[in-house]
Image (cartoon, rainbow, N blue to C red):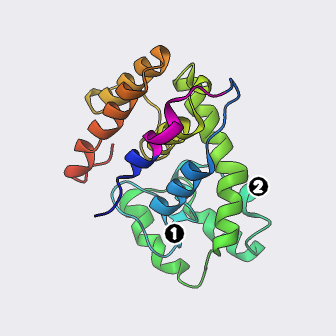
Amino acid sequence: MEDDPLDIVFGGTSRRSAPATPRISAAAVNLIKQEEGLDQPASWPGLNSGISLGRGYDLGSVSEEQFRSDWQKYLPKQHLDRLAQAIGLSGADAEALAPSFKDIKVERHAADQVFEQSTLPDYLKQAQEAFPGMEKLSPDVQGAILSNGYNRGFSMRGPRRKEIRDIRDAVARGDVPAISTALRSSARLWADSAPG
């Protein structure tokens, strides 16, 4: 039987308070990488996603300036120029464009560098803004919250965002079991494969 990733994150010492410096554990970073996989731009992920590369880097939700800044060390200019066509596209528009990128391959090292140096710090900042007090939690718990936000975003509006609001409230109280419960409850959103 496979370990439940949330049991790994919320088990052991993760309930201890961490210093008030926002950070996530190496175990949490590795879990996010494992769950995200290594996206190639010719393989459109589906639903309302844009063209995705590396560790879930969605060209539908970044600016061209940010994309070029993040990837210029890792992809040749001609690939950057072609992929820039996908900036802002999602859903069927992204799906239609994906096959034109079949010759572009993202290397694992490049994906990890962009993820760790650009994507994670950006999402950690967003998470801290959405969940004040998060930095007081252990690095594993911060990582679980970050992973959820990486997939769902940090908006609090709408009925499909109930768990995000529950997490916000639990973080404010420092209630790790309630955070775990809210994260597990989010699984209902994937049962019907609807974006969330």
Quarter of the picture holding the C terminus: top left
Residue 93 x/y as whole percent: 41, 62
Which residue position holds label 1? 39
Using the image, determine if residue 131 lies above or below residue 190. Answer: above
In the displayed image of the protein, which residue is found farthest to the front? 12
Magenta stretch in the rendered image: 9-18
Q: Nearer the viewer, mark 1 or mark 2?
A: 1
Label 2 belongs to which residue?
Answer: 69
Magenta-colored stretch includes residue 30: no
Residue 166: horizontal and vertical position, in percent?
35, 23
Q: Is residue 51 left or right of residue 92?
A: right
Q: Is residue 165 left or right of residue 153?
A: left
What secondary structure characterizes most of the magenta part?
Answer: helix
Mark 1: secondary structure? loop
Label 1: few (<14), some or many (≥20) within 10 Å?
A: many
Separation (CA) of disc 1 from disc 2: 19 Å
Residue at horizontal 48 percent and vertical 19 percent from the top: 174
In this view, the residue farthest toward the bottom is 103
Q: Amino acid at mark 2?
A: Ser
Q: Earlier in the sequence, mark 1 or mark 2?
A: 1
Indicate the position of residue 148 as horizontal and vertical percent values. Answer: 44, 42
Residue at image coords 30%, 40%: 184
Nearest the viewer among 49 and 119 is 119
Q: Residues within 10 Å of mark 2 (few under 14, many from 20)?
A: few
Secondary element under disc 2, as helix, strand or loop, is helix
Res 101 quadrant in image: bottom right
Residue closest to the far left: 192
- In percent of the image, x 26 and y 28: which residue is there? 159
Q: Which mark is residue 196?
A: none
Picture quarter with the N terminus: bottom left
Residue 34 placed where, x, y %?
A: 49, 62
